[in-house]
Amino acid sequence: MYSNAGIEATEVIGMADEKKNDIPEKGAVVQRDRETYAIAPDTPAGVVSPDTLRKIADVSEKYGAAAIKITSAQRMVIVGLKEEDIDSAWNDLEMSPGAAIGLCVRSVKICPGTTFCKRGIADSLGLGLALHGEYHGMNLPAKFKIGVSGCPNCCGESWVKDLGFFGFKKGFKVVVGGEAGKKPRIAQELTYVESIDDAKKVARSVFDYYTANAKPKERIGDFIDRIGFEEFTKGVL
Ligand code: SF4
């Protein structure tokens, strides 16, 4: 059986003190070893050029990263960096950090839609990138995820995102309040919009109402359950 016998109490305390934490201002997330860090460059929709992919690989190699992890938020996370290399790694990348932590719009998951997918019936990439450009990283009462799918197949996981969109021939269905975590919740249908501009306006209205009325750290699905979907709809539309 494992025992601490033989290790002086002062040594144990010293080791505990050395455990590291996230460094949000550097976009650095401490890893399981409590010693090394992961950084997540912003790669909207997970669509990158070969040059960007090479740069991520080069930086990972230069600083001896343990791995490059493709995440469910369509990021390429460089895992296992030493704390002293974080600034240099960002300088070499010349990319901005993805909002991987914090109470904000963390991610916009986007399917390829009519840009690349043969089943696509709407420009999900266009809408998703517009939402990402405008709202990614915006502070909100709790963490917030967006999903955009170019058809009802839901490859952007729109039904289990805080705010989701599905493409149809004449626009997008908007759903709200989804979550896939400890307490899974399927989103509810909020409205239909006919254009990317209208989708952005609905998103803004959802953010404004949610920010003005939710409790701190209350996910939007919990907020809707607390006040009722009818009341929420009246406030947003
Ligand atoms: S949701 Fe539809 S358009 Fe998007 S990737 Fe899936 S099948 Fe293609």
Image: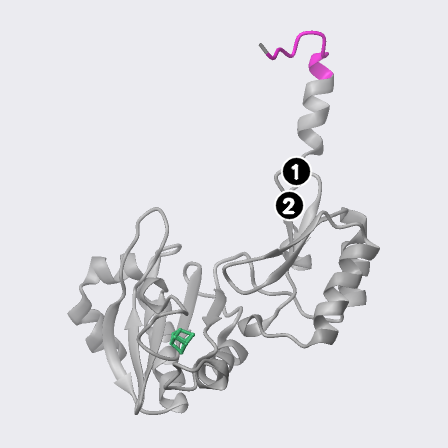
Mark 2 surroundings: few (<14), some (14-19) or many (≥20) residues within 10 A: many
144 on left or right of 171: right
As displayed, is residue 60 above or below residue 171? above
* In magenta stretch: residue 104: no
Pick the front one: 115 or 231: 115
Seen as rendered, the residue at the extreme top is 5
Q: Amino acid at mark 2?
A: Val
Q: Quadrant of the N terminus?
A: top right
- The answer for how far apart the CA atoms under marks 2 and 1 are is 6 Å
Identify the residue position indicated by label 1 in the image.
34
Q: Position of residue 102 (x, y in %)?
A: 52, 57
Asked where in the image residue 30 lies, by quadrant, the reply is top right
* In magenta stretch: residue 5: yes
Q: Quadrant of ligand 1?
A: bottom left
The residue drawn where x is 33% and y is 77% is: 166
Mark 2 CB near ligand 1 (8 Å cut) = no
Q: Amino acid at mark 1?
A: Arg
> Which secondary structure, mark 1?
loop
90 on left or right of 201: right
Label 2–label 1 contact, CB within 8 A: yes
The residue drawn where x is 31% and y is 66% is: 159
Asked where in the image residue 218 lies, by quadrant, the reply is bottom left
Pick the front one: 216 or 106: 106
Identify the residue position indicated by label 2 in the image.
30
The residue drawn where x is 60% and y is 13% is: 2
Mark 1 surroundings: few (<14), some (14-19) or many (≥20) residues within 10 A: some
Q: Position of residue 4 (x, y in %)?
A: 65, 12
Q: Position of residue 76 (x, y in %)?
A: 62, 61
Read off the magenta span. Answer: 2-10
Q: Position of residue 5 (x, y in %)?
A: 67, 7
Pick the front one: 89 or 168: 168
